[in-house]
Image (cartoon, grey):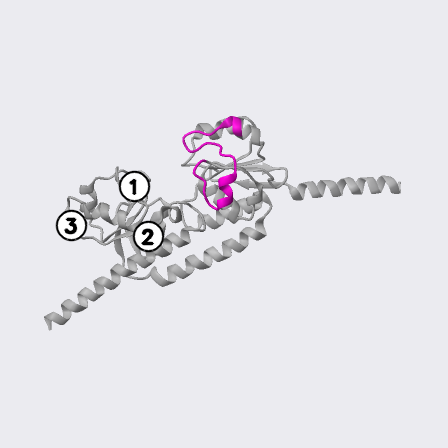
Amino acid sequence: MRCAALAVGALLLMQNVTAAAAVSLTDDRGRTLVLAAPAQRVVTLAPHLAEIVFAAGAGGRLAGVARFSDFPEAVMHLPQVGDGARVDLERIIALKPDLILAWQSGNQAADIERLEKLGFPVFVTEPARLMDIPRLLRAVGVLAGTLPAAEQVIDKYINNIKELRNSYGGHPALRVFYEIWHRPLLTVNGSHIISDVLALCGGRNVFAAAPVQTPTVSIEAVLAAQPDVIVGGGSAVAADEFAAQWRASPIPALRELPVFYVDPDTIQRQTPRIVEGARTICEALEKVRVSRQGRQEKTDRNRR
């Protein structure tokens, strides 16, 4: 009887351990993903997701990454599995991942569906606000079993965002045109995470009401939107090049606007590095405010 009791006890213990190791989490589509145990082989389908995996302390479990993944440097040595236009199904199958991280607006829905039909667990994400980044880090920490490491990064990130909000969020608002590409001229609407960054810095996205997330706009539309400042850099590799594109504008009023470059990798990827891009933008907008204040004070003195 005692042996039987011990056997039953051991079985119950094994069941409890298995249950404790199981992972269940709902993705940004509203679908619940269940893993029997924390993921050991992870494939990411967008560059920012590979960076998130490393930031969450699970970089050693990355088995494959999307094309253009380049940060941190370690991801550049991993097998590539395609990009937002098309994923390489054969390579993914060969890598045998037990978790695939996808980007809802950056990956083809058909690719995600095919992967799921093949039996791969796919967790689909769509970070659209600055505070979605801690949520994404925490999700990866849970799915990969590295939550303590992820929480450390989350705490630092949240503190940095609070610092920027406290330092710049209450300052006089500026109307901002944000450029993600020059030809054709592309910007973002209010649902994009970059718009959230502008608000953090006391900026107002002049195309926040655009009906699509990354609209193409005309130079005349930019003029009509009456921005106080132009920020961006997606189609340029340095500040001088970015500014030169606007100094060559056929519209005099746009040539005279202050123009600031921000490294696109630090602002257009939804990772903790967005703090760097946000700080660049906040400091740029503050320069415009200080310059305006100086001009106004000079005008007031001349009127006396």
The residue range painted magenta reads 67-91
What's the distance in space between the residues labelled 3 and 2, CA to CA? 22 Å
Judge whether residue 161 is colored magenta.
no
How many numbered circles are shown? 3
Task: Count residues near mark 2 (Cα–Cα under 10 Å), then give few for <14, some for 14-19, many for 20+.
Answer: many
Percent x, y for residue 117?
A: 53, 26
Percent x, y for residue 226?
A: 20, 50
Q: Residue 253 carries which label?
A: 3
Which element carries disc 1, helix, strand or loop? loop
What's the distance in space between the residues labelled 1 and 3, CA to CA? 20 Å
Q: In which quarter of the image is the C terminus?
A: bottom left
Tag in front: 2 or 1: 1
What's the distance in space between the residues labelled 2 and 1, CA to CA? 17 Å
User: Chief secondary structure of the magenta span?
Assistant: loop
The residue singled out by tag 1 in the image is 181
- What residue type is disc 1 on? Trp
Pick the front one: 68 or 26: 68
Residue farthest right in this picture: 1
- On screen, residue 242 versus residue 271, left or right, reads left
- What residue type is disc 3 on? Ala
Q: In this view, does 51 lie above or below 93?
A: below
Q: Which mark is residue 198?
A: 2
Q: In which quarter of the image is the N terminus?
A: top right
Contact between labelled residues 3 and 1, with CB atoms less than 8 Å apart: no
- For residue 32, which quarter of the picture? top right
Which element carries disc 2, helix, strand or loop? helix
Task: Count residues near mark 3 (Cα–Cα under 10 Å), then give few for <14, some for 14-19, many for 20+.
Answer: few
Query: Can I make out residue 177 in this image?
Result: no
Percent x, y for residue 218?
A: 21, 39
